[in-house]
Image (cartoon, rainbow, N blue to C red):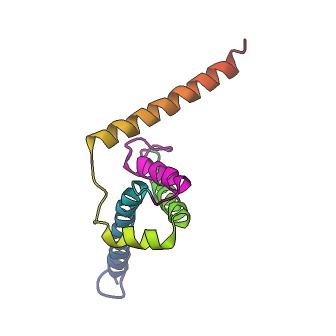
Amino acid sequence: MFSGRGGIMGLFRRWFARLGGWSKAVRADLSALWRAARDPRVPWPAKAVAFAVLAYALSPIDLIPDFIPVLGLLDDVIVVPLGIWLAIRLIPRPLWAEHRAAAGPAPPESRAGFVLVLALWLLGLLALGWALFGWLLPA
C-alpha cells in the first residue's frame, strides 16, 4: 500500500516530480521576463509588470511572511505565477516567443538588482509609513 506505483509513496513521487517541472518552468519564465523587461520593443506597461514580478519573485521580503503556516508559502505559489501570466499577456506574442526561446533556466543574479529591489521595498515602506502617519495624526 505504501510503495509501488499505486501506493501513497508512488503518488507523492509523481506529485513532487510534477511540482519540480512546474518550478523549472516558472524559473525559465522569470528568466524570459528578465530579457523582455530590458527589450526596448516591449511596451512600458508590460515592462512595469515584468519588473514588479521579478522584484517580488527575487525579493527576500514577501507580502505574507513565509513563517506563517500555509499562507506564507501559498502567496509565492499564487502571486508570482499570476504576475508572470499578466506580464506575458501584456508582451506581444512574437516578442515573448523570442525571449522564451532565448531564456536560460534561471534569472540572472546581480548585486545592482538586489540593491534596486531593497530600495523599492524601503521606498514602499516609507510611503506606507508616511500615509499612515498622516492618517493617524491629521494636521
- Residue 70 visible in the displayed image: no
Image quarter for residue 14? bottom left
Left or right of 72, for residue 30: left
- Residue at the far right: name it: 139
Q: Position of residue 66 (x, y in %)?
A: 42, 47
Q: Nearer the viewer, residue 137 or 68?
A: 137
Residue 3 point in image, percent of width and height: 29, 82
Residue 86, placed above or below residue 64: below
**Range covered by the magenta-colored residues:** 41-67
Is the N terminus in the top left, top right, bottom left or bottom right quadrant?
bottom left
**Extreme residue toward the front, this view:** 41
Q: Residue 52 in magenta?
A: yes
Q: Nearer the viewer, residue 105 or 42?
A: 42
- Using the rendered image of the protein, determine whether residue 114 is visible from the camera's viewpoint: yes
Let me know if residue 139 is in the magenta part. no
Q: Residue at x 45, y 30 (%)?
A: 122
Dividing the image into 4 quarters, which one contains the C terminus? top right
Direction from residue 7 to residue 83 in the image, left or right: right
